[in-house]
Amino acid sequence: MKLFIDTADLKEIREIASWGIVEGATTNPTLLSKQEGHPHDILREICEIVKGPVSAEVVSQDHEGMVREARELAKIHEHIVIKIPFGIEGLKAVKQLSGEGIKTNVTLVFSPSQALLAARAGANYISPFVGRLDDISNDGMEIVAQIVEIFNNYPDIETEVIVASIRHPMHVVEAALLGAPIATIPPKVFRQMVKHPLTDIGIERFLKDWEKVKDRMK
Ligand code: G3P
């Protein structure tokens, strides 16, 4: 499973990309609204850092507006992928953009039927939101399992699933166990994935024991 970073915070992206494990990034209007500066400059910088697909979302409500916005966003950098909110207008926009060779990521997907429609419209990626489903007492990961199974049933579907709205490391582990191709992970969860108390205790013990050997090294 590839790991994308789910933020528009350049400092965080630079830091976590330096670990060598980030292959793409996802943003949305909420994430960009939290940062200073022109959103297009931020998106360009993210593309330069991650050197992989970077999702940038349209805010138009109609397909003509979405397509216009998408063409502008696509000019920012070759890595830009256009995030299109799921809906009938979104499906029309995806179809049009796929014909123009502009990559799309259909977002706000909450059901397998939505995922299938987006795939058939020609989306390169779809983003089911697991955390927001869990928040309303639904099983977000069950939806991901169904989508992955459906896509695997039809090899002509090339759409990749990006598991989004991840809230904790177990969401990442469960997504990987299901064979989801990509998870987009907030910086906080990346840091939680690093930690294990036994690793910290182990390092502390190795260093302490090595102190006893140090004198013999002189
Ligand atoms: O990539 C989508 C993600 O940012 C949504 O996450 O935590 O706002 O549900 P959240």
Image (spheres, rainbow, N blue to C red):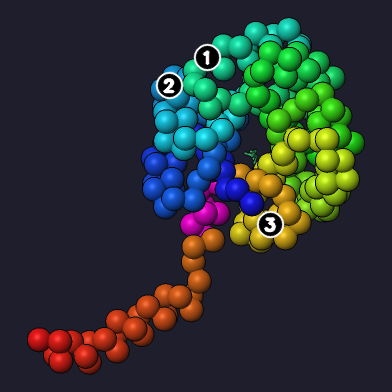
- Picture layout, residue 177 above or below residue 218: above
Q: Which residue is mark 1?
A: 75
* SS of the residue under disc 2: helix
Q: Nearer the viewer, residue 14 or 101?
A: 101
Specify whether residue 12 is in view: no
Main SS category, magenta section: helix
Specify whether residue 10 is in view: yes
Q: Which residue is mark 3?
A: 176
Q: Are marks 1 and 3 in contact (CB under 8 Å)?
A: no
Q: Nearer the viewer, residue 71 or 197?
A: 71
Q: Identify the mark nearer the N-term, 1 or 2.
A: 2
Query: What residue appears at the point 85 percent right and 49 percent down from the top-left corner?
Result: 149
* SS of the residue under disc 3: helix
The label shown at residue 218 is none
Between label 1 and label 2, give the one nearer the viewer: 1
Task: Name the amino acid type tagged 3.
Answer: Ala
- Report the quarter where the C terminus lies: bottom left
Q: Identify the mark nearer the N-term, 1 or 3.
A: 1
Q: Which residue is mark 2?
A: 41
Residue 190 lies in the magenta-colored region: yes
